[in-house]
Structures are given as structure tokens and as C-alpha cells.
Amino acid sequence: MIEINGLTFKYPTQAMPVLQNVHLAVEPGTLTLVTGPSGSGKSTLLRCLNGLVPHFSGGEISGTISVYGKDPVSAGPAEMSDLVSFVFQEPEAQFVYDIVEDEIAFALENRGMPREVMAARVDEVCGHLNLTSLRKRPITEISGGEMQRVAIASALATQPKVLILDEPTSQLDPAGAAELLQYVVALKQQLGLTVLIAEHRLDRLLPFADQLIFLPDGGQVLQGVPRAILPKMTQVPPIVRVGKQLGLDPLALSVEEFPAIHVDSVQNEDQPDGPPDEQSLLKIQSLNANLAGQVILDELDLSLARGQVTVLIGPNGAGKTTLLRAIMGLTSSEGERRLDGYDMDTLTLSEVISRVAYLPQNPADLLFADSVEEELRLTLSNHNRQFDSDLIHQHLARFGLADKAARYPRDLSVGERQRTALAAITVQNPDIILLDEPTRGLDYANKRALAAILNDWRRQDKAILVTTQDVEFAAQLADRVILLDAGRVQFQGAPAPAFTQFPAFRTQTAQLFPNTGWYLPRDVRVDRISNV
Amino acid sequence: MTVSATWVAWLVASLILLLSTRNPIYLFVIIILLFILGARQARRKGRHGWVHQNLRFTGTMLILSALINTLFTHTGQTELFVLPDEWLLIGGPFTLESLLYGAVNGLVISALYLLFDVFNLSLSIKQITRLIPHAFRPLTVMTTVSLTFFPAIQERTRHIREAQMIRGNPMEKISDWLPILAPLLVGSLEDALLLSESMTARGFHARNDQPDNRLVLVGLILVVFAAFSGWLLRLFAYPTWISILLYSLGAVVLVVVLATAGKAQHVTSLHQDDWRRQDELAFTLLMAAGLGLIVTLVTKLDAGFSYTPFPRLDLPEVTLIGLCLSLIPGIPLLFKHHD
């Protein structure tokens, strides 16, 4: 049993407490979902349970915490590690060793466990998480989903009572995320684990959660069964939104729970298959790219048109990032790349980037100046453009950063940092914008802000290409969809077929209403539905 | 052949060989053997292009070293051409002897690099760090983390460099590289912080029974004293046996200190080296070859190891013993690498 009473915590560098008078209780053997906007204290709350806060972070703490009878504040993280295991957000950054089984055994070696017992434990967790065939593999050679499983196996090797996962699915494709969650749920049932998961995206997790903890940005922490908490939250997954639209009581949390309904015949509107050739601002033909002797892009064709958001989806390792890098000329490739009719092979990188902006997966890599304003000024200076203070402030205002101009970019929140990077790469007013996984780690509010920026660019007639694993976000924005798998285009065209016909990329709405062409809550026509 | 001790024996024997010869023919044999062995190990690890990369490195090293030595060393009797003496540093005769001497240096540097690269390919990071005594557990983990971090930092540098280029930084002048430092440093520190947080959460250094630090300190002072005084006595021509006695005393104290401190660490390892018949054979062969090499060097039995092209270029001497000993780096080729 986990009990928290009157917990208040303030980081040493902050003026206000991030957690204030929190009271919570978690029953043993349950799965608890912890959610809330960025900066609301989800990770801090979870770190309090194994003593990393305040022992590792410093800061002022008051109130009481009890985890299976132990107080993490007095015991400290080393002692709590027998009881509580923690899997961090970026698994690749938490590995000590280079081989899977060595990594899993790390915590056991630290405990001086006899070799035979240790080998048996490693066998056991590898069996639970289907890692037996990967035991001898270098960690750098396994996929993102497999890395998450290795991180969980490392955490479980010590046989803890509590398993904490901090945004475990943020880097995974829909299939990988679903598979990982199945493992976690099976572990909870088989081992009687108490599981706490911090997550922004609730759609995948709600069906498995025994309780939901919502930490608002200020205000009272909400705790209870998901059906009791969800109606009080403003940002909810599509299935809950649709349920609310239809007046369901109780709310359904999964497609399986959704009541049988009948939809009167719906006339599907035919959508254009893509922009005609003459509108294409960027045209790629027969693009091939290899990395370490492996084919990554295979005879790939695509085009981007003005005033359109094209969303690139596909499983992890499909070649999405390589495609964006190949378009920019950052990775060697063969094939035809034409920018507004010009052969891109004849253009210098400087000429390309004056018209094409590219946001890599980690926006922090772009930031190095002392202030947000300085970041934009440097881009202009690199492009030999005149510095215009008014222009910079107008540009910052478009990204909701007007009051952040003097701030040090790396001190900003995840969403603000990303918007700073976006502002820095677009201040020269490019025609084409390529974004690689821009929704990673963003909460609902920041995703909404990003969507507003993309819509604004669409209105300005920019051609936009976005890669994302967030199907619901993609569905909201896409004018066109490209589905990439194993380096080949599997589908290219209007969003409706992409989000309704391919099982791995079907939105929740599409799953609820098959054969209707509806794939977003706003598509649902209540007047066509009967038998609710 | 997978046992760490066998590979260490191979490394030490090959290193002694490499550092004791300047004979270009032997060095050539050593490099060819290292290439064959390295290609096998790289194939096993899926490192495509290893041979090509290292051929490029060896070629570059050979040319650079030969050119630099020819430019700045003007000794030797076979003149190729002459530059005016008043040309600072490079003025004077350019000789074939200097060219060859530089090339031999290039061969030695390339062979050393290849030797450590093959060693790195043959053992996992954990096998390498397991060679560090338990007493230095924190050092072991630190080494492991550094070895794991190095490729990560290389990758991060590439990402940041690209990120800067797509913001219009041409990355041509040294000053263009400055913007890489801030994100690289901050990003690496963030990663290091996360890693240490993860290690703490997994009980690293949870419950070590620390040995009495004073005893360890006294022991280590004794070791340093014994080694230093042994060296000092040899320097002033005192009987050698006194120095050997002091060195031995220091070694015994060091082993005792390490064993005592190591026991207190309570650390175990998932793996222990699995000595198979071929490992035993390889180890015995390497020890015998190493011993033969040391005897050859100590007794100054002329095996053609020493060679200098100065004052006038001459063909290097090749003896059967020398040729046989230069095959030491190729001993692992006689055995299969089992997993």
C-alpha cells in the first residue's frame, strides 16, 4: 500500500512548490495512471516514491509518504530500490552496459547476489518480457520498443513490489506501444505488482487503469476510478469525447466496452488523392538510401504542395527520419529531388535551407544562444538577412513566445523550447517546413499550440511535412497522409482511408465507427446513430 | 577463444613485440596479421567497412609520418633533393633514410592502433571492465559508462552539427564549431545526470561495507614507498637484489590491499570466463611465445628487431626467430571465436 499525506515539495531553484498538500492512496496490485499537463509534478510525485526526490534533487519536502510501510524520505533511494523500481522516460539514456543481459543484471551485481541466483532471475525476467532471444544482443542494435522492455526487465530483476514507468510509450509506434502495455498488464497480473504510469496520452492506457490520478496545473489533485475522474478533465481521449457527445453513462474507456450501435448509412465523400503535379513545391522521385549496407528508402516517390499539411506515418524503423534527412541532403541518397522545379543536387545546403526548414527530433540540439531573441537573430545573421527587431517580436508572438524573448532557451519548458526551435528555423520565412516527431513528450495543451502553428502556416501557403507516432494528432491535421513501411510508400493520399483502413493507424473514432469514414470525434454525426 | 585473460595475454605479448621492434618487415607481417584477425572479429560483430576504414588510416599514417619526418629531419646519406638552407626548418637535404624512418614510425603507430582496436572488437565492454579489480568498483562502472558514453557523444555531436547546419551555420571555420559546445555540454550533462539517477534508483553503491580507509591508505603509501625506493637504489648502483626485494614487497602489499578493499565491495558478476580447451591452449601458447620474446629481448639475442636506416639505407636483417616471434599477433587465428 502506498499512502501520501499532506505532501508538499519545492525544488531548490523554484519559488513555488511543484506539489502542494497532496493526499493519495494506491492499493497494492493495481495499475494507476498519473496524468496532467507538463510541469504539473507527475515525475516529481513518482520520484518521491523511491526517494530520488529529495535525496537526488534536493529541495524542501514536508508531509508523510509510506510505501509498503517504508518512508522513502528517511530510507533514501538505495534502500528503496529493493521495493520500488523506476523506468525513466528515455531508456537509451539510462543504460550502463552495452549488452542486454548485462544491463538486466546490473542491479543484481550491485547487491552482490550469487551468480546462480542472478542467472535464474535474468532468465525469469527475460521470459516474462520475451527477451530471451535478445539476451546477447548489443543494446544499440535493438528497437525502441525492445529498449523499453530491457529497461523494464532491468527494473523487475530485483523483484520489486512497485514498478514506476515515466511516459513509457512516448517514443513508440502504435503497435509497439500496445505490445508494451500488454506486457505491463500481464506482469501486474502475474507478479501482483503495483504499477504507476505517468503518461500524457490516455487513449491507450485507460482500459487497463484501475485508478487515475490527475494533477492539474495548480489546484486540487484528483484521484479515483477513471470513470469518476474523466468527466472532470477538460482534455480527454477521443473515445471519451465521443462518449460524452453521445451522452453515454457510464463512459466507455475502450472500443470493446463501447455499446453496440447502429449507424444509418453514411455517404462517404470522395477526397482528392493528393495535389496535382503542377502544385507540387517539392517533388521526390525514385529516392533510395542505404545505411550500413541496409536499404532504408526504396524507390520512394512523394510530393508536397503549398497550403497542405502532409503527415508521414509508419512503424519505428520505417525510414521516416532518413527520408527527412535525405530531403535536406543530410544523408546520402540517390534519386530525383526537385525544389520548385530546381534539381536539389545542384543547390548548396545554404540555398536549400533558405527555402526548407527542418526541425529534428531533439529540438534542444538547435538551441545554443543566451536568449530566445538571440536564437532568431543568429538564424537571420547566418542567412545574411537584416536584423529587424519588430519582425523578430512579431515572429515570436506567433509562437506564443512574446514574453519569453529575453529568457535562456534551455530553461524553458519542453513545449516552449520546441516552439523556440521552430521559431528559430522559420524566421527566414521558408516555403517548406519538415518536422520530425514534433509531438514527442508534449502534453495536450502544447500539442494544441503546435496544431495552431501548423494551421497558421497552412494559411500562409507553406508546404508542411510532419512525421509523428501520434495518430490522433496526425488525423486532426492531415490534408494528406503518406504511410511508410520498410522504406517503401505503402499508401499516399487522403487522410480518411489512412486512418480508417490500416489497423495499426486507425484512430479511436474509426475503430468505434467502422465503414463510416469517420475518424475524428468532430466527424461523428449523432443524428445518424441509433441504438445507443 | 573468448576468455578475457587470453586476450590480455595476447595484447601484452603483442604490445611488447611492437614496442621492441623497428624492423619494417616484421612490422609489415604484424600489420597483415592484425588486419586478418581484425577483419574476422569485425565480421563477427557486424562492423561493415572495418578493413576499408583501417586501411585508409594506416595509409594516411604511413604517408603523413614519412612526409613529416622527411621534411624536418635532414640526416642520411641518400639525398633525394635539396631545399635552400635558409628556408626555416625545412631547408636542407631530403633523404631516403629519413623517409623510411618516418614510414617505420607510421607503421608502429598504425600497428598500435590496430592492436587496441582488435582487442576492443574481441571483448565486450563488460569483459574489459571486469579486468579491473573489485576494489575499484566505482572506477569500473565509471570506465564502463565512459566507454558507453563515447559513441553516444559522437552521435550527439553529429546531430548537433547537422542541426547547426540547417540553421545556416556553414560549419567551415573553427569559430563555426563553437555553437556545438553549448548543446553538447548541456546535453551530455543532462544524460549523465539521468544515468546517475537511474544507477542510484537501481541501488548502485547501496550497501558496501567500506573497509577501514586508514589501512588502505597506509597500504598504498607503503606500495609507493617500496617502488620509489627500489628505483632510487638502482639509480645509485646499489645491489639489484635490494631493489627486487623492495619491488616484491610493494607488489605483495598492493595485492593484499586490493584483495581487502575488493572483498568489502560485495559485488558479483553475472558471467565468469568459461575456460574451454582451446582457451587453455591459446593461453599456454601465448604465454610461451611471450616468454620466448622476453628471453630473446633480455638476452639480447639478435633477432633482427632493431633496425635503423641511418646513416645509409640498408636492407633490414630477418632471422627465423624474429620472423616466428612476429607471428604472435596472429595466434588467435589458430582458434575459433566461440560465443
Image (cartoon, coloured by chain):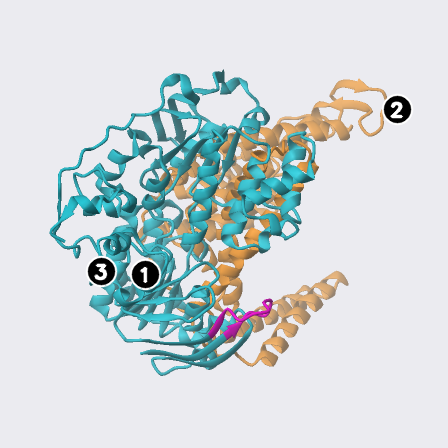
Chain colours: A cyan, B orange
Q: Which residue is mark 3?
A: A251
Left or right, B257 with respect to B330, comes to right
Mark in the foreground, 1 or 3: 3
Q: Whole-percent x and y of residue B38?
A: 44, 38
Disc 3 packing (10 Å; few <14; some 14–19; many ≥20): many
Q: Secondary structure at mark 1?
A: helix
Q: Whole-percent x and y of residue A473?
A: 36, 44
The type of residue carrying mark 2 is Glu
**Sequence-earlier tag: 1 or 3:** 1
**Main SS of residues in magenta:** loop
Are marks 1 and 3 in one subunit?
A: yes
Is residue B160 at least partly visible in the picture?
A: no
> Does the magenta run of residues contain A153?
no
Q: Quadrant of residue A84?
A: bottom left
> Does the magenta run of residues contain A11?
yes
Nearer the observer, A141 or A352: A352
Nearer the observer, B250 or A452: A452
Q: Which residue is mark 1?
A: A153
Q: Which residue is mark 2?
A: B86
